[in-house]
Amino acid sequence: MNKFTTLLFISGGLLLAGCFGSEDIKRPDPATLTSEDQSYFCGMTAAGHPGPKAQIHILGQTVPIWFAATRDAVGYMKLPDENNEITAVYVTDMGKANWQSPESGPWIDIKKATLVIESKRRGGMGAPAVVPFAEQAAAESFISDYGGKVVSLDDIPIDYVLGMVEIPDNPALSTVQ
């Protein structure tokens, strides 16, 4: 390789590297969850579980990756090798959605959501939930009914979203209605 080719190669790499973190990349709109969409970690249908859902859009992919639980999406975001090309993350606004069947949204940007953890409500597969709300008042009302606490996305403990949890034999029995 000559000096010109090497310089061109390095310059192209720097341009691409700058592109991934750029604010100039168009954020995709939220997609519509269907009964066909599979949850990223377990391969089960994402829509077939109670609690908030999530969708993560990846640079260069036209279809988001789906999560049956917002907790799983936050876990994915905290994995060091998985989060470098995320262009958008949308979660269910549980201030407006039905807990038992929230697959239709409404979707909100996770970075703008008020997030509640450690509540009595259980998400997909009966696991502890990360519960997103568009409005702080809705989160506070939820906490008065089901307990929990508000945390920022960055302050969600990694063990809460990636640690082992005891899943009940029948998740429906552990879900506080």
Image (cartoon, rainbow, N blue to C red):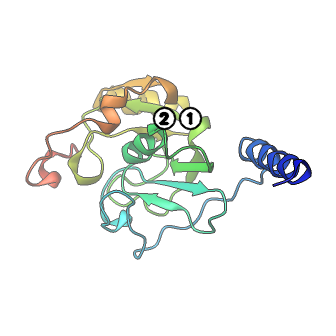
The vertical placement of 127 against 33, above or below, is: above
Name the kind of residue labelled 2 in the image.
Ala
Toward the left, the furthest residue is: 169
* Horizontal arrangement in the rendering, residue 49 relative to residue 92 (left or right): left
Crowd tier of the residue under label 2, counting other residues whose Cα lies within 10 Å: few below 14, some 14–19, many 20 or above: some
* Horizontal arrangement in the rendering, residue 121 relative to residue 143 (left or right): left
User: How many numbered discs?
Assistant: 2
* Horizontal arrangement in the rendering, residue 43 relative to residue 11 (left or right): left
Residue 90 at what x, y percent from top left? 56, 50
- 10 vs 29, nearest the viewer: 10
Residue drawn 38% across the image and 38% down it: 130
* Horizontal arrangement in the rendering, residue 132 relative to residue 16 (left or right): left
Q: Tell me, for residue 20, which label it has, or none.
A: none
Residue drawn 44% across the image and 62% down it: 103
Residue drawn 36% across the image and 56% down it: 68
Residue drawn 77% across the image and 49% down it: 16
Q: CA distance from mark 2 to mark 1?
A: 5 Å
- 29 vs 2, nearest the viewer: 2
Name the kind of residue labelled 1 in the image.
Glu
Toward the right, the furthest residue is: 4
Toward the front, the furthest residue is: 2
Toward the bottom, the furthest residue is: 36
The residue identified by callout 2 is 138
Q: Tell me, for residue 135, which label it has, or none.
A: 1
Residue 105 at what x, y percent from top left? 51, 57
Residue 17 at what x, y percent from top left? 74, 44
Residue 30 at what x, y percent from top left? 61, 59
- 114 vs 81, nearest the viewer: 81
Quadrant that contains the N terminus: bottom right
> Tags 2 and 1 in contact by the CB under 8 Å rule?
yes
Q: Is residue 145 visible?
A: no
